[in-house]
Amino acid sequence: MDGEFCVVCGRTDRSLVDGLCADCAADRTVLVKVPAHAEVTVCPTCGARQIGSHWERRGASESLSADDLTPLVTVHPDAALRTIRWEETKSTATVRDLVGRARLRFRGTEREAEIALSVRTVHRTCPECSRRSGKYYTAVLQLRGGGDDRTEKARALRERLDGVWAALLGEARRDAQDAFSWREELPEGWDCYFTDTLAARSVARLARQRFGATIRESATLAGRKEGQDLYRVTFCLRFRRAGAPVQP
């Protein structure tokens, strides 16, 4: 409207909010801020980060990146963060001091802001790795031959099943790959242990679809927790050798 002007700079050619143009409002507004003391909790075994009560990004590097730092930034409700570039200024074994140079859009204008951030890395083993180190499991996949050719030597059988397993795990969903804990070599094949039964069942079904494996499922009582029975499930997978005769 005619006669309106910014109460700080006196300009009349820009829209005003509470009597201030965007530039003057930005100069008087904290557009981005970070906590005085920040922490990022990292699993030293798998690189997962603790976010609230759960863990994410298994397989990530233990070194902090923008994926760890940028979520620590709080942006003003009227601003939009475009980019932020981090530069380390000082570091110790567990603490990094950084400067972040942020580009933002505030009320139609482009702005830049600089913030200082100090982050401490906390190492804590995630529940998944803790269970693995304790040989915890809820399901086991038994990889066995098809029983259709008794002339196959034990070593050749294990080598064949090893190749099948590598292909199978490579095609499995990420959550199933994460649930796989360890495996043991046996004269008759391999036993593959999982920390999640549903993940193990999905791999067993993939084995049937991808390699024509037969599945026999069984469960044994492993104990009780909070009044509930706990079971360990065994999936016996039999893989017939290519070209072997089908038993009548």
Image (cartoon, rainbow, N blue to C red):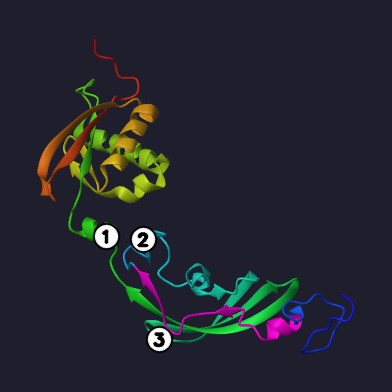
Q: Which residues are magenta?
A: 23-42
Q: Which residue is mark 1?
A: 127
The amino acid marked with disc number 3 is: Thr
Query: Can you give x and y, in whole percent of width and height, for residue 157 in the image?
Result: 25, 33
What is the CA distance from the residue labelled 1 to the residue labelled 2?
9 Å
Question: Going 19% across and 52% down the picture, which residue do you hit?
Answer: 136
Query: Which residue is depicted at the point 36% across and 33% down?
Result: 206
Bin the neighbour count of mark 2 within 10 Å (Cα to Cα): few under 14, some 14-19, many 20 and up: some
Pick whichever of labels 3 and 1 is earlier in the sequence: 3
Whether residue 191 is visible, yes or no, is no
Asked if the residue under mark 2 is in contact with the one under mark 1, i.e. CB atoms within 8 Å, the reply is: yes
| Residue that badge 3 annotates | 92
Q: Is residue 196 above or below residue 53?
A: above
Q: Is residue 80 left or right of residue 194?
A: right
134 to 213, vertically: above or below: below
In the image, 188 versus 212, the foreground residue is 212
Percent x, y of residue 164: 34, 36
Provide residue 186's location: percent of width, then percent of height: 17, 40
Find residue 4 and report its image quarter.
bottom right
Residue that label 2 marks: 55
Helix, strand, or loop for circle 1? Answer: helix
Amino acid found under the numbered disc labelled 2: Trp
Q: Is residue 155 left or right of residue 92?
A: left
Is 170 in the magenta? Answer: no
What residue is at 27 percent from the left and 46 percent from the top? 196
Earlier residue among tags 1 and 2:
2
For the point 24% across and 13% down, the residue is 247
